[in-house]
Image: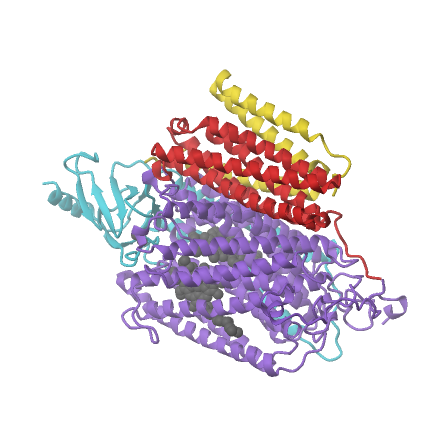
Amino acid sequence: MNSTSPNAESVAHDAEPGFWRAYLFSTDHKRIAKQYLSVALFWAVMGGLTAYLMRWQLAYPDTEVPGWGFIAPDFYNMLVTMHGTIMVFFVAMPILLAAFGNFLIPLMIGARDMAFPRLNMLSFWVFALASLVLLTSLFVPGGAASAGWTGYPPLSAKPEYTGVTWGLNLWLLALALEFASFLMGGVNFLTTAINMRAPGMSFFRLPLLVWMELTAAVIFMLSVGPLIAGAVMLLMDRVVGTTFFLPEGGGEPLLWQHLFWFFGHPEVYVILLPGFGLILEIIPVFSRKPIFGYRPIIYSTIVAGALSFVVWAHHQFLSGMDPRLAMPFSITTIIISVPFALIVFAMIATLWRGSITFSTPMLFAMGTLSVFIFGGLTGIFNGSAPVDIYIHDTYFIVAHFHYTLFSAVFFAGFAGLTYWFPKMFGRMMNEQLGKLHFWLTFVFFNAVFIPMHVVGLGGMMRRISDPTQYEFLRPLQPLNQFITVAAILLLLSQLVFVVNFFRSLICGKVAERNPWQANTLEWRVPSPPPHENFDAIPVVYHGPYEYNSSEAAVDWLPQDRRVTTGAATR
Amino acid sequence: MTARARHPNYFLVWLMLVGLVMVSVAAGTVLSKTAALILIFSVATVKAALVILNYMHLKYEKTLIYALVLIPLVIVMVLMFALFPDFVFHGHNGNGS
Amino acid sequence: MEAQTLTSQTPSGKIGVWWFLASEIPVFGGLIVSYIVLRLGGAGWSEASSHLNFNFALANTFVLLTSSLTMVLAFAEVEAERPRRVGNYLLLTILLGVLFLAVKGFEYAGEIGKGFTPGAGIFWSFYYGMTGLHALHVLAGIVVNLILYLQALSGALQRHGHRVELAGLYWHFVDVVWIFLFPLLYLT
Amino acid sequence: MAEIISGWFPENVSSFGGEIDALFRLILYVTGAWFILTEGLILFFLLRYRRREGRRAAYVAGDNLRQLAWILVPCLIVLLLDLWLDFRGAEVWAKIKGQVPPSDFHIQVTGKQFNWEILYPGPDKEFGTADDVLMENELHVPASRVVRVILKSKDVIHSFFLPNLRLKQDAVPGRAITAWFEATKPGKYPLPCAELCGFGHTGMNGWLFAHSPEDYAKWAKQQWP
Ligand code: HEA
Ligand code: HEA
Ligand code: CUA
Ligand SMILES: [Cu+2]
């Protein structure tokens, strides 16, 4: 049982699989994670480009977009739809759940791979197919889907209303494939965590990232069903002439909204929780302190996850739904701030009396936290039904969800990428470039989205391609132009990351096993870890955050290091 | 293979299922409309329970698996009741067509 | 000696399938719930429902129930370690599944012949939506069982007997869905 | 403070708009205080406890109630504040959306791609009679009077948005949804559509003309001589 003895080398992790097995049809969770990451980064560039086109159009509607040309209103609608769809389903979920979850869950729990490696490969390829279908949908005659990422019928249910034919069908198909892929992924995550933990790795010794990924997977799996049903119904309305959502045939447009948001709201936590998980790993390491309130954080996450199933109608206060429903949903919505407050407070308390180093991952983690607080607090305005009467469908909402989403996806994502880059690719990223990237991103992000709140309060509606058509919005146009300039700078700032990423891949400093002196199990294996991860399955003796514990001589205590009484005195 | 050795009598379960189908078909012809509805759906629930407990061996499973059956059902119920005001009791806002 | 991992004593395959089913419940649940509330709120649905072919559906109910029996018997034979019979019961299950789809096909043809297409009204939307999604699941189950049957023929199934149990879980789930669809569509 | 905040909004001319704005300010103060507190603490801790030679971090795991009280008590305060906001919200909501005050001024607004069709019942106050008048994108109402709007749609979902009246309500095909407002000040106000409804969503804009009683009488005279 001794984990350090160099036995059990029988594992075939040195056997060189052929090119196809190694790179394309690999069943290795780490390779699959990188596959997800590559596809997601491709989509992130696309999502950024759509943002650029939209922003230019909004600021200077009468001019051609440099590098593109004139943007017609229906094309603008396609841009909005694709931007939302891409960012939520093809960037956020693949990076936060699929890439980090796949890479880290087996390593962190001390397993050699996922419970179902071949299913894992299948889920990636289904996701790749979904990506291909979505990409195709951009080029079919009639154009891409243009009914918003929320695809409300009747607009989305009849081709006459948008002029879009196959674009929207393929959009639905891409979503269905995406959901299938993440369902398979979820099955894998959960089974792996239930059945594959290393000896000693009890549930309450799991790193919080694992908890967050698992909760996210559970929420996803239990909420997506009604939307899958809804997607089937919508596709049937479009293709075989049913009338589920068409009132002229006895259908109900509002039904879609319920089915969509029943999933849609839990979905935002599916994105947020892994983001939180990433920074919950990073904050203790760079404060050299245990996370404050490990168990309460877990309980809060579960409470938030459960509550997320009963808040969805806050997206529909003004949809024509029965107004008596508004108050119950408004109450649950605002109360969900309590579990999140606890997690936020716990993170802040972790900093207290720490010994904090400002490495790039830590800076991004702090960016995530501070930006999320802002976005979470604006959620309270939206959650108050009467206030939502005015701010619903304005840029105030757009600003709210960029604060939350960008924080979870990009700030936390960059934190995670810079932190685990050495483990993933065996090389360190450049700190100077990393810090430069952080500060540029942080400053320009706020420059884009703080003014957006003001524009929203001024009354500017979402999903309009030309604000200058409205007299009452004209005074806001300078602000819109400011936002656009800042957005372009935000986009350009990402080039620093691109440069850093590829430069470090090729010629970064070679990474040691445990460059950050962290406790969790992924750091005890070589960087990058070999196939099958561990030469011998480790035995776990502690929780994941024993930094500065009096039991160890140094200020960290790996989960698999047993302390003998002698070393305990320091 | 948790169900080894102690499995239920599958034929008996099948007979019960077939009998219950008969009951629900007969219900419509004999009982009043509401009574028939209640009976039919109770019978369906019993049938489903028989299949899940015996054929799917839920009887022999641990809490985790029970939770995996019950939690989604609770969630679906939540969805259903939230939909009532909008689609069943057409709201007081005059939401008719 | 390799250290033992912590497991829940329930095999991974089974946990995986149950998680999958747990996420399937809301799929059918969402559809059924939509049907229920729209039907309770609307009028004239019973009239539409009376045009359905009750006899076909009743026959199909028996077919599917029986297929569940043969499926579970296949698994019983796995446990009894009688591989030949496992294959036979699997084949029977497959045939019953195909029979179900065939009957369903006739039923659809009859209804469409009478002008009750998916576009004929909201009841028909739901009728085709619910039975269609269910039929797709039956089809998927048939494919799974077919693969297992081929493995049984080649002898590969002997080492992977638990797969019959897993396929059975799915198959019975599809049966359970039908147990609710039948009264929802045909008996009310 | 309140003036600065009001400056962000379009002028309020709604009988209930003040309450929405006040609720907004209340939430802003509550969340603003938490914002300053949390972000301030983060900044303070980051600077105060940055790494220095010779100082080790404290081992504080928050694994007992005495320590946890530092986060649990604030959470309790958050809960109480939440309930307060909910309570205030419920009152305002009941007033605006809960019931429609009595009114004999009815107008039917139908959204269609991409216009508002505004149907006036005429002097007989009945829809579907000969004196009905249909206008596109022009909603004429008397100020200081409760106006009942029956919202319908011919094709897709639109959203009836009166920024100055702090009113927004979707118009859903297949439903007739009642909304109401009372303009407190005569004037011409924008009436955009706030729900994506197709390529013409941008620019789907109407006008609300809130007339003083005399002007309204004059206008009505022109329509129904
Ligand atoms: C990661 C994504 C994410 C996250 C985490 C959240 C979190 C929250 N969201 Fe957000 N939201 C979105 C993404 C997200 N949202 C998206 C994408 C949309 C728009 C979709 C579309 O229409 O296209 C949206 C829209 C949206 C709406 C609909 C608005 C409208 O269309 O009119 C509402 C309404 O209630 C809302 C509320 C909330 C609330 C209450 C939270 C809460 O979870 C926040 C809780 C956190 C805190 C409150 C901060 C921490 C707490 C403290 C510091 C303590 C002090 C707090 C108090 C005293 C309250 N959101
Ligand atoms: C994760 C989610 C996410 C993210 C990150 C963003 C990022 C941005 N979004 Fe988006 N947005 C949405 C989700 C997101 N958005 C959603 C859901 C909607 C609603 C859609 C709808 O209404 O239907 C929306 C709508 C929306 C609108 C409203 C449009 C309208 O209603 O008319 C606007 C307008 O300004 C906007 C702007 C921006 C900008 C300027 C950014 C910038 O922050 C973009 C910056 C770009 C990047 C950060 C990408 C850079 C690339 C990399 C980092 C990859 C590096 C590559 C390698 C290493 C190879 N977004
Ligand atoms: Cu009508 Cu937007
Ligand atoms: Cu939400």
Q: Residue furthest top?
A: B30
- Left or right placement of residue A196 versus residue C138 in this view: right
Of the pair A567 and A14, the residue shown nearer to us: A14
Task: Work out whether residue D1 can be spotted.
Answer: no
Palette colour of chain D: cyan
Palette colour of chain C: red
Palette colour of chain A: purple
Instruction: Say which quadrant the N terminus of chain D sits in.
Output: bottom left
Of the pair A264 and D37, the residue shown nearer to us: A264
Palette colour of chain B: yellow
Q: Position of residue B72 (x, y in %)?
A: 59, 42
Instruction: Say which quadrant the C terminus of chain D sits in.
Output: top left
Q: Position of residue A186 (x, y in %)?
A: 60, 54
Task: Work out whether residue D180 can be spotted.
Answer: yes
Residue A323 image-quadrant placement: top left
- Left or right placement of residue A421 versus residue A201 in this view: left
